[in-house]
Image: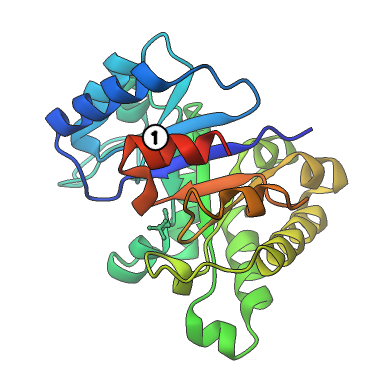
Amino acid sequence: MRKPIIAGNWKMHKTSSETKEFILELLNNFSELENVEVVICPPFTSLETAANLLKGSNIKLGAQNVHYEKSGAFTGEVAPDMLKDLGVDYCIIGHSERRQYFGETDETVNKKVKAVLEVGIIPIMCVGETLSERENGETESVCKTQVTEGLKGLTAEEIKKVVIAYEPVWAIGTGKSATKEDADETIGYIRKVVEEIAGKEVADAIRIQYGGSVKPENITSYMEMPQIDGALVGGASLQVKSFLEIAKF
Ligand SMILES: O=C[C@H](O)COP(=O)(O)O
């Protein structure tokens, strides 16, 4: 049985003080949810504050990006060990905004996935098609390439640990969410791709989330689908109330 994972990607929102306020409110209202893993992914500048406040709770901490080298002359970058040392459990890798605005490629995604696994951080590897790719009927081929290249060179045991987030780019921050059937079908396809790469046991175990305009109003419909193991939530993760409603789907 795959444990669902609800992760909040705050993107470039909230100062360290705002993070503190959010987490204190979250902890006050958070009754331990046993059947779901809850993760918040604040900006780098808030990770330490978040780590200290979340200590002892079962809410996990995620980063939004990482560099694949261990250290060196990479001004402005953050290494896997630096995240691990702060108590980071997860790291979003290859979000479409990073692919679109910061030159992230399948190759860098692959290097980053390997680099975080090496220090014991679980990657949340994002894949998904753009609107024009969807309109050209390329959803499956785009996802297949991104998944195959992103997981290249990993052992089956390593692949099993990875979380994949299927985020159709046209659904991100637009209010236009994929239908539950479409999301489930593409996630089922991604699972087949994983099976081709690493076998059925891994494909059955790997968690694959949906992301793109997930809200309290639509989370239940996604979570009732057999292939969908959770959500990567952007906008609706910025308020405690809506994030909790989603986590309690
Ligand atoms: O990482 C989260 C996704 O980009 C979804 O963002 P959104 O929920 O604001 O559409």
Residue 101, image x, y percentages: 28, 68
Instruction: Determine the residue positioned at 78% across, 49% down.
Output: 198
Instruction: Determine the residue positioned at 58% across, 82% down.
Output: 134
Is residue 66 visible in the rendered image? The answer is: no
Residue 180, image x, y percentages: 66, 62
Q: Is residue 154 left or right of residue 105?
A: right
Q: Is residue 2 left or right of residue 71?
A: right
How many numbered badges does the structure rendering display? 1
Figure quadrant of the N terminus: top right
Instruction: Determine the residue positioned at 19% across, 41% down.
Output: 14
Element on which disc 1 rests = strand
Give the residue at the far bottom of this rendering.
136
Q: Is residue 97 left or right of residue 1?
A: left
Give the residue at the far top of this rendering.
56
Compared with 52, 41 (above or below) is: below
Residue 77, image x, y percentages: 23, 44
Q: Nearer the viewer, residue 162 or 155?
A: 162
Instruction: Determine the residue positioned at 85% across, 40% down.
Output: 201
Q: Nearer the viewer, residue 52 or 74?
A: 52
Give the residue at the far right of this rendering.
200
What is the three-letter code of the residue carrying label 1?
A: Ile
Which quarter of the figure has residue 20? top left
Residue 104, image x, y percentages: 38, 63
Which quarter of the figure has residue 241? top left
Crowd class of label 1 (few under 14; some 14 to 19; many from 20; radius 10 Å): many
Q: Quadrant of ligand 1?
A: bottom left
The residue that disc 1 covers is: 40
Figure quadrant of the C terminus: top right
Compared with 139, 154 (above or below) is: above
Q: How is the image coloured?
A: rainbow
Which quarter of the figure has residue 137? bottom right
Q: Nearer the viewer, residue 233 or 65?
A: 233
